[in-house]
Image: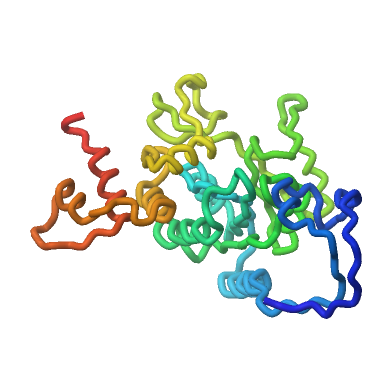
Amino acid sequence: VGYIEVGEVFKFNAEKSSQNIFRANEAAPAQQSQSGELAVSGEIKICDDKLAEVRKLIEEVKREQNVRKISAIMLTAEPFNRAHERLIRMTIDSSDLVLLFLLKSHGADEMMSFSLKKSVLEYFIQNYVPKNRLIIVPFENSNLFSSHLNPTLECIAAHRLGAHKLIVGQNHAGIGMFYDHNVAHTVLERYKNDLNLDIVVLPELVYCDECKTLVSTKTCPHGQHHHIKYHAQTLKTLLLAGILPPAILMRRDISAMILSELFPNRFENIQKLCDDLFPSNGLLEKQTEREFYENLMKLYQTTSLT
């Protein structure tokens, strides 16, 4: 992807790593995996710059579609669920273009490979939303945005790629949310002026078993005991156990994508399972593990006998 012309080699001072602007608030696992005894400095040449390609694509879309309002969303998308979908749709409603910053997870937070997360997002964009209104910005090689530890840098990154608005959830780590005269404020409000960037804090999204749909905690009149929350760790636990999450939490086709990648060749005779469980059009059809999970969820959603 590039090369460095080494100008100097020196010992790495681990005690001063916290003062390094390029490692601000990195997640501990990322620091441990990258800290060596020696460091090098010199001229760096990047040959394969994916962010430069994304920036070029953004400029092309802005010209072709006469884009005026650009919004940014930072997602770890691990796993991508219905709340993420609603967040994206709400943002599209008020924007000409949405930048989806896909962040890399580290250590215990990492369940899925970055390529799988990106594939899931691309699949969702291709099938369920206007694909000319979203651009994925992959932050695969940066540790500065893991676990949303650096909301300030998220604002700067969004601004540098042309966003006029940054969408964050009220549970976003590090935004320092507080209320004054019943008005929500965050520590990021200074960037409204410094970067001319509007910061929008959205309320938590939940599934209400009384409303029978996805709602925000701000608009639902029912208590928390009626709410099913979209906790990433809970969904990870189900997926890592090989269990399909309920369709109200994740789309069945997205769950199938993830499980077929997490548990490849899980069944000895997948074809026999499919033939025994699922109806067909009378022809012998070869089934993949992904199709098996999708059809299995269809059986779970059968209502006449449940």
Q: Quadrant of the N terminus?
A: bottom right
Which residue occupies the extreme front position in the image?
37
- Position of 50 relative to 257 (above/below): below
Query: Which quarter of the figure has residue 288?
Result: bottom left
Q: Residue at x 60, y 73 (%)?
A: 57
Residue 217 placement: quadrant: top right
Q: Is 74 displayed left or right of 281 in the figure? A: right
Q: Residue at x 29, y 43 (%)?
A: 297
x then y, percent, for residue 63: 62, 74
**Total residue callouts:** 0
Q: Quadrant of residue 129?
A: bottom left
Which residue is at a point 91% across and 51% down the rendered structure image? 16
For the C terminus, the image quarter is top left
Color theme of the render: rainbow
Residue 4 appears in view: yes
The residue at the point 50 percent across, 49 percent down is 89
Residue 229: where, in percent of width, then height? Answer: 50, 31
261 with respect to 203 (left or right): left
> Is any part of residue 158 visible from this angle?
no
Question: In the rendering, at what x and y percent does residue 287 appear?
Answer: 24, 59
Q: Position of residue 68 (x, y in %)?
A: 64, 63
